[in-house]
Image (cartoon, helix red, strand yellow):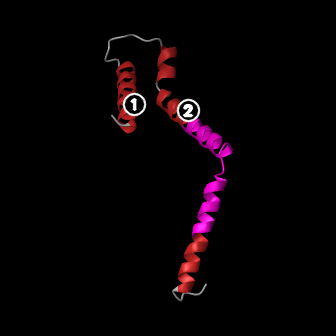
Amino acid sequence: MTKLAQWLWGLALLGSAWAALTMGALGLELPSSCREVLWPLPAYLLVSAGCYALGTVGYRVATFHDCEDAARELQSQIQEARADLTRRGLRF
């Protein structure tokens, strides 16, 4: 199962539980304070997921490591390609 399928199953499970609780499908009489918290819960979860995503991206950018060996290798390959193209008559 792919990660997307796992997320979709989780969202479907949470969504069906939320719908069952808010629509009264289970026959439970929830206090009004619980219903007031339950209705905007998807919006809270969406904002929380966005904050988590922003925090994760920010952390990954802050701890990004440079690959100096790979950069040197790439520069040498570029120089070799330029030399080869110069031998074939291309001018830069």
15 and 68: which is toward the camera: 68
Q: Assess whether residue 59 is covered by the magenta stretch.
A: yes
Residue span colored magenta: 50-77
- Residue 48: assigned label: 2
**Most common secondary structure along the magenta stretch:** helix
**In the picture shown, does residue 14 fall above or below 85?**
above
Q: Measuring 43% from the left and 12% from the top, which residue is drawn there?
A: 30
Can you say which quadrant of the picture contains the N terminus?
top left
- Is tag 1's residue or tag 2's residue first in the polypeptide sequence? 1
Quarter location, residue 59: top right
SS at badge 2? helix
5 and 91: which is toward the camera: 91
| Label 1 close to label 2 by CB (< 8 Å) | no
User: In the image, residue 5 lies at what x, y percent?
Assistant: 35, 35
Q: Measuring 36% from the left and 37% from the top, which residue is drawn there?
A: 2
Quarter location, residue 25: top left
- Residue 11: assigned label: 1
Q: Amino acid at mark 2?
A: Ser
All told, the count of numbered labels is 2
SS at badge 1? helix
